[in-house]
Structures are given as C-alpha cells and as structure tokens.
Amino acid sequence: MHPTEPPFQRIQFYLTAHYDCSYLPGRQARSQVATPAGLIDTSLFSELARIGFRRSGLYVYRPRCDGCQACTPARIPVEQFQLRRSQRRCLVRNADIHIAARPLVFDEAHYQLYRRYQSARHSGGGMDRDDRDQYRAFLLTSRVDSLLLEFTLGDDIVMVSLVDRLLDGLSAVYTFFEPRLAKRSLGVFNILTQIEWTQRMGLDYAYLGYWIEASPKMSYKADYTPVEVLRDGQWQTLQRKV
C-alpha cells in the first residue's frame, strides 16, 4: 500500500530537513512525516504501521534517507515465535516481576525511573534533561489506542513500556527500566512480554520498530525468530546469516 492510496487520502506527507543520524555515525537522515496528527487515529495508524511508519508523541514518521535504507521495519508473527534457550532463561530469571496495564496518566515514580534510565543510558543526549512536560509530550500524548505496561518487583517499579494497540498487533513505542538491574536483561524480558500480550489479545504481530543490521543498538531484533522485515513494500521473513 502506498501513502497516496486510500485510506491515506485524508492526510499529507512531507520530508524533513536533513539531520544527524542517531544510529550510524557520520550519516545524514531524513524522515517522511504524516500530517495532520489530529486525523491519525488507531485505524489509520494501523495502516501506516503496515508500511513502516512509527509514532513518537503526535509525530508519525518513517525514515526517508537519501541513498540509505538501513532502517528496516521489523515485526514478529507471534503465533510462530520460537523461544531461544537464553530467552527462556530470561523468563525464569524475571518470574518474580508483576506486569500490569496502566493508562497514559502521569506517575511521579515512572518519571523518576525515566530520569534514572536516561542519565545512565543516554547521558548527554538531551533526553536526560527532560522535564515533566517534555516527558508527558513524549510518552503520554497519543491519539491512538495506547497503554503503559508497568513492571514491578516487590514494591518497586523497575520498567515501564509504552505500546500502541493496533488492529493487527502491538507496536513497541518506548521502554525505560531500572539501570542497576542490568543482569536481569529487562529489555529482553520486555519484548518477550509484548509477544505474550500480543498473543493473549488475539493479535497477529509484535511490531518492534526498526532493525538496523549495522547498529549494535538496533541489530538485536534479529534475535527473535522468526522476525519479518519490510523490504520493497513486502513483509518477508529475515534470513539470518550463518
């Protein structure tokens, strides 16, 4: 489906100016943005996600870089998902964590966890200085069906994951977790949880965002098999290199 075809005739698309790529050093990036944001509801965003768009607050976009197609949309067909041995161990390691769905409502404990995560993992990147209003705009502003997955260990909130509930799956938006618990592999546990919740909701896909083979921060998504990637307008199973 192309963005000039129905149901996209209600919205317009524009290209941003060039900016520094966040994932591949020395490269310039551009994004294609869908507007106006007020018209993009769950149904329309579900169609946009199928052709590779993502959401950040009210900003709906996909990469459109000159001469580069490294950012590849990725999703897991959850009924075909196969646990690896290391992922099974991760589930056992985190069996004492309780998971609950929460609405997009500001919670001071969430915000303080977000600040600790940003300071530990992305210090100097700008997001480590986000105030409460910036946090709300980034994570709690949505015109689609969104929820927070809250992970608690005893009395402590140790991870929060923002997901969008699309017509055919769950789409991971952003996750932050307690940096002092690195040995628990909470990022892996989060993806496994989203796969399980997608199955529980009777949906087909867990959308993981962009897989970038050359970026250590983004290449891990190939560890969840089978994973499908969007290439030349078609979703196809990624063939792992032996």
Image (cartoon, rainbow, N blue to C red):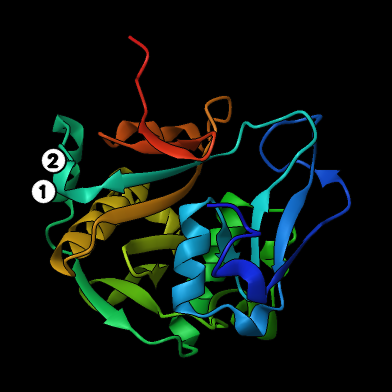
Near mark 1 (Cα within 10 A), the count class, few <14, some 14-19 or many ≥20, is few
User: Foreground mark, 2 or 1?
Assistant: 2
* Residue drawn at 32 percent across, 32 percent down: 223
Q: Quadrant of residue 133?
A: bottom right
Q: Quadrant of the C terminus?
A: top left
Measuring from the top left, give residue 71's x and y in whole percent: 59, 38
Vertical side of 240 occupied by 139: above or below: below
Residue at 81% from the left image edge and 29% from the top image edge: 26
Check the image and report above or below for 38 versus 43: below
Q: Mark on residue 88?
A: 2
Quadrant in which residue 212 is drawn: top right
Q: Which amino acid type is marked by label 1? A: Val
Residue 191 lies, in percent from the top left, at: 31, 52
Q: What residue does disc 1 label?
A: 92
Q: Assign a secondary structure to mark 2.
A: helix
State the SS at label 1.
Answer: helix
Q: Mark 2 packing: few (<14 Cα in 10 Å), some, or many (20+)? A: few
Q: Residue at x 41, y 34 (%)?
A: 220
Residue lying farthest top?
242
**107 and 202: which one is in front?**
202
**Which residue shows up at 50% across the image and 89% down it?**
106
